[in-house]
Image (cartoon, rainbow, N blue to C red):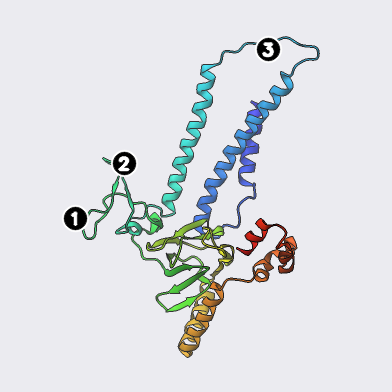
């Protein structure tokens, strides 16, 4: 009993103090972290139980000096096997239900986000008369959903279902940059700026190949798929700037396809918005030229020295050291030249 209490207390403490997750900058991040902490609590408890049992068995049942006899012949224990099979099955089922609930709270089953989109699967909830069926009906020009839908992305949370977002931003992924367009104001930027506490919807597209729009501090990631629109809808809560990463191998310079998301207070966001609108109104040609230069800079392949610059301080790599490796072996030379 004492061992069980100790394992439980250690697991509960570690589940909340593991320090493995980055800053939670959105409402959705809080939901995901709750699920992750629960899994860490259960996993650490099972780890202590299993490894503790092994250590006790190694010490208590080790072979005694000069003992050459056979160990006891054990046929098995059916009740014990049922117990240690049933308990993990129940744990997995409970975590599955919990994760399903978190996904729903984040907006993963928003009907409006899925309605009319090609390739979407229609899912009947508990009590339905079928598990799944194709959404697209050739006889209907604009099919309407009759069940909960699996959205292509994360849509509105249940408490905001049917309500328009406070801010909509169009996101275009291309080799190797993210371009953000604000339809209401006509602003185009290489960085994403959003107001704190507002419901934000990102309409995500890809111009060329498959990309993945990843916000680590927001616990959100969504593929940018050529020819198909996807979306992410979230509410930022923590003012600051955070990385935007492409999490899908999209080409030779995939690692350099990064940008930033800036979460402003409402006053700071209005000031930024006004500044961008004023710049655009004052000189549209200059703004278009600056945007073209920005896109060109983001999409132009980097030289070896430019690409290695962020890592030079950490690992000591430079263009000169990379050049010195060429010719070391035919295989290495071929890899470096490609």
* Horizontal and vertical percent position of residue 106: 44, 54
* Horizontal and vertical percent position of residue 72: 65, 11
| Residue depicted at 56% across the width and 68% down the height | 260
Read off the residue under disc 2: 131
Q: CA distance from mark 2 to mark 1?
A: 22 Å
Q: Quadrant of residue 262 in the image? A: bottom right
Left or right placement of residue 12 versus residue 284 in this view: right
Mark 1: secondary structure: loop
> In the rendered image, is residue 5 in sight?
no
Quarter of the image for the N terminus: give it: top right
| Residue depicted at 73% across the width and 60% down the height | 315
Left or right placement of residue 171 versus residue 244 in this view: left
Read off the residue under disc 1: 139
* Horizontal and vertical percent position of residue 121: 33, 50
**Extreme residue toward the front, this view:** 330
Does residue 39 sit above or below 141 in this rendering? above
Mark 3: secondary structure: loop
> In the rendered image, is residue 123 in sight?
yes
**Extreme residue toward the bottom, this view:** 282
**Extreme residue toward the left, this view:** 139
Read off the residue under disc 3: 71
**Extreme residue toward the right, this view:** 65
Q: Quadrant of residue 163 in the image? A: bottom left
Q: CA distance from mark 3 to mark 1?
A: 72 Å
Quarter of the image for the C terminus: give it: bottom right
Q: CA distance from mark 3 to mark 2?
A: 52 Å
């Amino acid at each position: 009993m004492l061992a069980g209490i100790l394992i439980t207390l250690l697991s509960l403490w570690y589940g909340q103090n593991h320090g493995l997750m980055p800053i939670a900058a959105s409402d959705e991040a809080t939901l995901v972290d709750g699920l992750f902490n629960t899994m860490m609590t259960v996993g650490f408890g099972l780890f202590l139980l299993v490894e503790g049992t092994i250590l006790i068995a190694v010490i208590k049942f080790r072979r005694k000096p000069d003992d050459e006899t056979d160990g006891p012949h054990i046929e098995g224990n059916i009740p014990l096997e049922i117990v240690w099979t049933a308990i993990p099955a129940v744990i997995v089922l409970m975590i599955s239900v919990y994760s399903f609930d978190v996904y729903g709270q984040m907006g993963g089953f928003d009907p409006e986000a899925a309605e009319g989109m090609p390739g979407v699967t229609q899912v009947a909830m508990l009590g339905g008369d079928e598990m799944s069926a194709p959404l697209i009906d050739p006889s209907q020009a604009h099919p309407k959903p009759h069940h909960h839908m699996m959205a292509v992305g994360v849509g509105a949370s249940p408490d905001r279902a049917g309500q328009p977002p406070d801010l909509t931003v169009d996101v275009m992924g291309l080799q190797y940059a993210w371009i953000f367009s604000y339809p209401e104001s006509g602003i185009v930027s290489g960085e994403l700026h959003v107001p704190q506490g507002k419901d934000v919807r990102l309409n995500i597209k890809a111009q060329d190949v498959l990309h993945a729009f990843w916000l680590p501090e927001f616990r959100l990631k969504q593929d940018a798929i050529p020819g198909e629109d996807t979306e992410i809808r979230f509410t930022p809560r923590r003012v600051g700037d955070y990385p935007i990463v492409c999490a899908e191998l999209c080409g030779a310079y995939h690692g350099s396809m990064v940008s930033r998301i800036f979460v402003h207070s409402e006053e700071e966001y209005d000031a930024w918005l006004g500044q961008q609108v004023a710049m655009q109104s004052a000189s549209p040609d200059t703004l278009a030229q600056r945007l073209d230069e920005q896109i060109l800079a983001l999409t132009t392949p980097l030289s070896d020295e430019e690409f290695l610059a962020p890592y030079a301080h950490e690992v000591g790599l430079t263009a000169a050291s990379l050049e010195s490796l060429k010719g070391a072996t035919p295989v290495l030379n071929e890899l470096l030249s490609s």
